[in-house]
Image (cartoon, grey):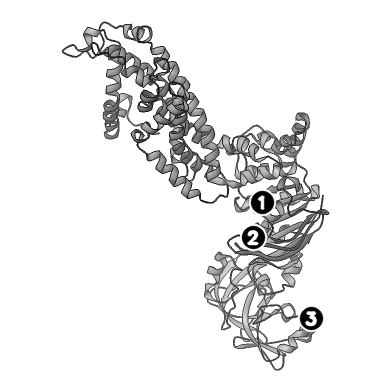
Amino acid sequence: MKVTRVGWRRYLNGVNFGVVVVILFVMLPIYWLVISSLKQPAALGATPPQFFPNPLSFANYRDAFSTYGFGVYFRNSVVVTIATTILVLFFGSLAGYGLGRLPMRGKSAILITLLIISLFPGIAVVPPLYLLERTIGILNSYQALIVPYTAFNLPFAIWILRNYFQGIPKEMEETGRIDGASPWRIYWSIVLPQALPGLFTAGVFTFTAAWTEFLMALTFNNSNSYRTIPVGIALFGTPFNIPYGTIFAASVVAVIPIGILVFVFRKSVVSGLTAGSVKG
Amino acid sequence: MATIEMANIKKRYPNGADVIHDVSLSIADGEFMVLVGPSGCGKTTLLRMIAGLEDITGGDLKIGDRRVNEVSPKDRDIAMVFQNYALYPHMSVRDNIGFALKLRKSEPGEIKRKVEEAAELLGLTPYLDTKPRQLSGGQRQRVAMGRAIVREPSVFLMDEPLSNLDAKLRVKMRSEILKIQRKLGVATVYVTHDQTEAMTMGDRVAVLSKGNILQCDTPQNLYDHPVDQFVASFIGSPSINMYSAQLSEGAKTIRIGGEYVEITDVVHIAHPNLASYADSRITVGIRPEDFELVDKGTQNSITATVELVEALGSELLVHFNTDAKAVVVEGAKDEEETILEASGAGVARIEPRAGVKAGDVIGLRPNPAVMHFFDVNTELAIY
């Protein structure tokens, strides 16, 4: 890159200015969330508003875990989300491979059905699912959430992975066949490693969706020991007291895993989303 | 080591499209057989049928003494090199070459030894631990070869392995592949659309068109004795000149455009059937090098206007126009050549210092002894 201006001046141009505005717009609420979580209760509603917490306090974090049992919610969320992600990637990659590669009738019908399923409004399926889960007797359990989360995140994962598999040259699998690899071996050692960016993309999206899901989590699991983070935080408040500081603190902790995930896999996520649209 | 025997092989896709009609071909052990033809002629399909990647809908395929129609690709003891190499991008060169051995559960020590032997043979030793994406096209091509070699198969199948390389490298790899094949002595089926590649590499060359083998012979025989117009014009570069012509005075002379060329007795002895075409229309084919540059109006010559001269140093390619009607065989020529010949006439290959330039009117005397004659209707050669 040619650098003509020195120091900070070279960052000063129209495009960069636009970027800065957008970043500010996006980051400001997060900034507010973080600093508010570090304020003492009295400082939260202070006029004029405090842009830097003064004094700095970690009491909200301590309260979230000790008084409000945030640790349990966090653990539940981790279990449900990771289980969901693994299941979605496992079934999604197999289905995506099948739909992308194998000679099958009615592929497009299946794909369109999947698309329709993924567009279904969640609220419409919650009541029947509730009745179903009650009949089976899995309300208030991890599987009460893992099963529907897996089902509703699969369509998107299948679509993404199918596009990815289609972009892998067929000759690679044929070479594998000639070399004596079983279909499972071809899938595992040749196809899947090349679809890693697609797996990351589908994984990050599934993880985020399951991590933040509220409606089903609220409805299916009303026992405190199976509540996930979004429901847990929402129920921090009582009719007499809404502990804003603690809610902010819990929210910050809740955002961290997703932040890390997206940061680590950001390149793969973008390439996964554009797979098939541009021949690489 | 094995022979390949194809008997009445057919391929019909479920949608009813026939791509291979009735192909019979036997390939000797250690032979380098080239399948050549324009795109869509079925040569790749045929190769994929030998590999077991496409079902065979009719006929018998034998590798060695075994009928392998229903045998899965891995059990046919073949190795295939694809046009795009199909290297595994996530594996190092070493793992790419050794993958098949690993699948066979060979000893790690043996895999290492064989992989390094193959790498040595192909000059890949310094690159064993790099990933394919860091290699050049030629090196990737060699890795693909290495992957085929280590398996010590009884048959090599190659699907246009050089077409992704630039012209210079292609020539180099041509001889390298040949050298390796000679060294290993494995029967090889090599698919290409490039007739130069076919001619320079094949022990025998099978010319395919529209799902049929038109002719299978040594390169020289294909060139000298093509069975029909298609083979005549597909093989050879620049292509053969073909004109609509008329036999007259019995079959003593042939009229090409407005000129008459005497047909000597030697020709009649070589082509006894020509007599039965006396006084009728035929197609005549003259190779570019079978013209002799003479003065305009010389007996037994045709008059030509020079359109373009390509000086190649060792020879001159003279593109000319005559009043004869050129016969063009569909699909048999490269597009590039067709454009050059859009003037509608022909090419002569003459000695380099003849001093011919565009616009000259010259005489070209064809050598009747090496002329090719074709039936106008069947397009088959007249013998």
Is label 2 in contact with label 3 (beta carbons under 8 Å)?
no
Residue identifier under label 2:
B194
- Image coordinates for residue B300, horizontal then vertical, percent: 68, 86
Residue identifier under label 1:
B53
**SS class of the residue under badge 1?**
loop
Of all residues shown, which one is farthest toward the right?
B65
In the image, residue B127 sits, relative to residue A225, either above or below, namely below
Instruction: Please tell me which residue lies in front, B196 or A226.
Output: A226
- Image coordinates for residue A181, horizontal then vertical, percent: 68, 40
Splitting the image into 4 quarters, where does residue B128 fall? top right
Instruction: Please tell me which residue lies in front, B320 or A206.
Output: A206
**SS class of the residue under badge 2?**
loop
Circle 3 Cα neighbour tier, 10 Å, few/some/many (<14 / 14–19 / ≥20): few
Residue type highlighted by circle 1: Leu
Circle 2 Cα neighbour tier, 10 Å, few/some/many (<14 / 14–19 / ≥20): some
Residue type highlighted by circle 2: Asp
Splitting the image into 4 quarters, where does residue B377 fall? bottom right
